[in-house]
Image (cartoon, rainbow, N blue to C red):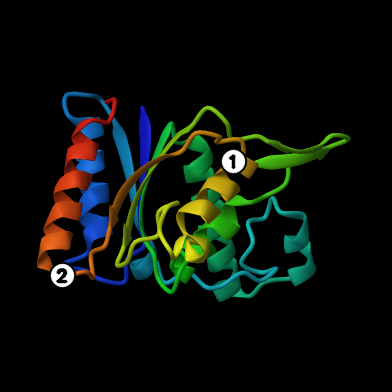
Amino acid sequence: MKLLHIDASILAGGSVSRDLSALIVERLTAGAQVEVTYRDLVADNLPHLTPATLPSAHPVSAMAGPLDAAAQADRDASDRMLEEFLAADVVVIGAPMYNFTIPSQLKAWIDRLAVPGKTFSYSANGPVGLAGGKRVIVAVARGGFYGPESAAASAEHAESYLRSVFGFMGITQPEFILAEGLAGGDHNKAKALASARDAVQQLAA
């Protein structure tokens, strides 16, 4: 089995999403033969989306024209990220919610995956996801409460976005481990962390 582990928190020590994603990987790899590829998207310092940074399989990438050495290195990195995702059986993502949505680093990574002919295509009946069959598990950490019954539910654009974009790629049942209310005081944080860690242990290995 091939597992791709992605972290996107700008925090090092003290990052809840990083701690939870590591626990998920530990849970899934215990006693199993698993090839793990790890990417820290903050350390990778991904440039934002341009024709030059798109994977070479994307039709818009040709608009960049000839690339210099630095741009070619960015293109090569994008190609590797797409291939890592396509090759993975399981993808584990640590995704904090910043300013109501996912970190820009995580969005830049996703932009490299959304490639027609690779992860989706269009048919007469609309878009068709091509990356189905993968297991995607996301550890979401957020300071407030944004659940369906909360007053701030309409401001939640992290989990909802990830469900939409992975569904577009054919991954219709991503799994989410949620730690929320982390900024609501020590009691709320401790309760959220305990609940999330328990949920990790309940994951099917």
Residue 181 x/y as whole percent: 26, 62
Residue 80, numbered circle = none
The quadrant in which residue 195 appears is top left
| Residue 164 or residue 62, whichever sits in front | 164
Q: What amino acid type should be assigned to the residue bearing mark 2?
A: Gly
| Residue 65 seen in the current view | no
Q: Earlier in the sequence, mark 1 or mark 2?
A: 1
**Which residue is disc 1 drawn over?**
167
- Residue at the (22%, 24%) spot, across then down: 32
| Residue 71 or residue 41, whichever sits in front | 41
- Residue at the (43%, 64%) spot, across then down: 151
| Residue 100 or residue 132, whichever sits in front | 100
Residue 69 x/y as whole percent: 57, 73
Depth check, mark 1 against mark 2: the one in front is 2
Instruction: Please give left or right for residue 61 compared with residue 98 in the image.
Output: right
How many labels sit on residues? 2
Residue 146 x/y as whole percent: 40, 60
**Which residue is disc 2 drawn over?**
185
Instruction: Please give left or right for residue 107 compared with residue 61 in the image.
Output: left
Q: Residues within 10 Å of mark 1 (few under 14, many from 20)?
A: some
Quadrant where the C terminus is found in the figure: top left
Q: Residues within 10 Å of mark 2 (few under 14, many from 20)?
A: few
Q: What amino acid type should be assigned to the residue bearing mark 1?
A: Gly
Q: In the image, is residue 68 above or below residue 9?
A: below
Residue 188 x/y as whole percent: 17, 61
Instruction: Please give left or right for residue 121 compared with residue 7 in the image.
Output: right
> What separation in Å lies between label 1 and label 2 (alpha carbons)?
34 Å
